[in-house]
Amino acid sequence: MMPDAEVLVIGGGPAGAVCALALSRLGRDVVLCEAAAFPRDHIGICLSPGVISQLDFLGVQHILDHSAHQIGLPIERRWESTSFTPTPIKALLVDRGQFDSDMLAMATANRVRVLQPAMVLSFSRAAEGWVADVGTSTGIRQVRAAFLVDARGRSSGHRDRRRRGTPTVAVHGEWQGEVRRAVRISAADASWTWAAPTGRRKRVAVAFTNPGLLRRMKGSLDERYRSLLEDADAIEPGLELATPPRVCDATPYIAEGDQDGLLRIGDADAALDPLSSSGVQAAIQSALCAGPVINTLLTESADHAAANEYWSYRRISRSETHQTWASHRYAEAYAARRTSFWHSRATASSTATSSSATNPPLPSPGQVLRMSEKVTFVEAPCLVDNLVVRVKSLMHPNIGEPVAYFDGVSLGPMMRALSAGIAASEVVSLWSQSGSPEKAMALLGWCWQHEIAVAV
Ligand SMILES: Cc1cc2nc3c(=O)[nH]c(=O)nc-3n(C[C@H](O)[C@H](O)[C@H](O)COP(=O)(O)OP(=O)(O)OC[C@H]3O[C@@H](n4cnc5c(N)ncnc54)[C@H](O)[C@@H]3O)c2cc1C
């Protein structure tokens, strides 16, 4: 039997919608199954600023213009200190029901065939790829596809996950009354809390703590939730709890175990520590990376090993870099509150390396430069024209990963100029021939900052 589609995407959250959209734009035939009827509620309403650039890149930034979203709300933080102070950063709060519906509508507008509500009940190997049993309003139907994308979020049936931080639960509820028009993030001795207005008289508050601590606290869930919020001074007096509090897991993890012809993306693959409010950004980033990887794996003549290597490196480094970032923020809170809650988070293991901290000014025009002896070149997987291919790439201990291009310019030929001693001004004029003087200056700055170009 002919497959129904080249790719079946399971889940229509931000990861699934963006991956389906990206693959369809690459000319792939995509079916997406989403279990819920939209709009539906979803936790995770504060978007990190990177989402704006991602939507811009996808050409769908207008999605944020909807009146249900709130842009530029002030943020007050009580973290290293004992009182709230305003931060220079402003918050972008979205109505996830609206946001996710609009993202999925973008996929539909780009020829993705969306089945909804349609829950994938099971999937298994078939001769041409995969066959999935899908529960729809008219009964169970089968969908066949050459490639499967698991974008089911935290609820993904995949059980093989490695924890990337301290076990964490979130207790969340909605409050009513005269709410302050600001996001509040506050640390207490054994929890931290995030609260934000979701309407004119509505405020959502999420308390994060250890599952063991929550179990040992006395009283009903309602009482324990109120006590956590009191510790964090997160809810102003006079507000009333409008919904019974709910508990969900918020532990960061990464999935393990690869399967040919299947990729997990978004939270189905790796969930980040909720502290950064960047789960949606990471889900979209994972989907944008998966598009060309799947495109490569579906191209018979392409380098499949390079595609798998590219995917594996990116998903692991995304998770590690974020865990390192979160540990540093927890260490700031630990400095003010020396409790085991903060200590375990501040020291959560991570193997991520940070790039060179030194940031010297540009070399003077007469400074003679050469390429550092620590520079090596490797054939590393790289994205070229929506396919993953191996490209000669520069490696140096200060840059962490192989780099093939700088602002679109291939680094291999550029580095030849530095093989013998050469003045900085001459390097800039040579490199300007392959781009603009501004690009050449930027490349020199990058090489100098990372000690790829060193003084003779
Ligand atoms: C307590 C908490 C607070 C958070 N706060 C933030 C925040 O402020 N900002 C932020 O950016 N992130 C936050 N996050 C993370 C964020 O919610 C997720 O990272 C993001 O939603 C992941 O997107 P996704 O598309 O991978 O998964 P999801 O958004 O979960 O989408 C998965 C979709 O798959 C569908 N699905 C599931 N099973 C099936 C099936 N069998 N068949 C068909 N469809 C199926 C579901 O209905 C759902 O629509 C938070 C997470 C937690 C736990």
Image: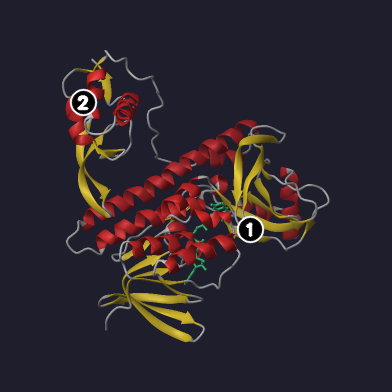
Kindly identify which numbered label has been placed on residue 430. Answer: 2
Q: Describe the colour scheme in one phrase.
A: secondary structure
Q: Is residue 400 left or right of residue 231?
A: left
Give the image quarter of residue 250.
bottom right
At mark 1, the secondary structure is: loop
Residue at image location 31% in from the left, 67% down from the top? 28
Residue at image location 27% in from the left, 26% down from the top? 452
On the question of residue 384 being in view, the answer is yes
Whether 81 is drawn above or below 234: the answer is above
Q: Is residue 32 left or right of residue 84?
A: left
Q: Amino acid at mark 1?
A: Ala
Kindly identify which numbered label has been placed on residue 68. Answer: 1
Q: Nearer the viewer, residue 94 or 287?
A: 94
Whether 276 is drawn above or below 375: the answer is below
Residue at image location 47% in from the left, 43% down from the top? 323
Which residue ends up furthest to the right in the rendered image? 238
Give the image quarter of residue 114.
bottom left
Residue at image location 61% in from the left, 41% down from the top? 90
Q: Position of residue 382 (x, y in %)?
A: 26, 47
Do the residues bearing badges 2 and 1 touch, measured as CB atoms within 8 Å? Answer: no
> Mark 2 or 1 closer to N-term?
1
At mark 2, the secondary structure is: helix
Question: Which quadrant does the N terminus fall into?
Answer: bottom left
Kindly identify which numbered label has been placed on residue 282. Answer: none
Whether 116 is drawn above or below 334: the answer is below
On the question of residue 219 being in view, the answer is no
Mark 2 to mark 1: distance in Å? Answer: 52 Å
Q: Amino acid at mark 2?
A: Leu
Q: Position of residue 244 (x, y in %)?
A: 72, 63
Give the image quarter of residue 414.
top left
Q: Nearer the viewer, residue 128 or 180?
A: 180
Question: Which quadrant does the C terminus fall into?
Answer: top left
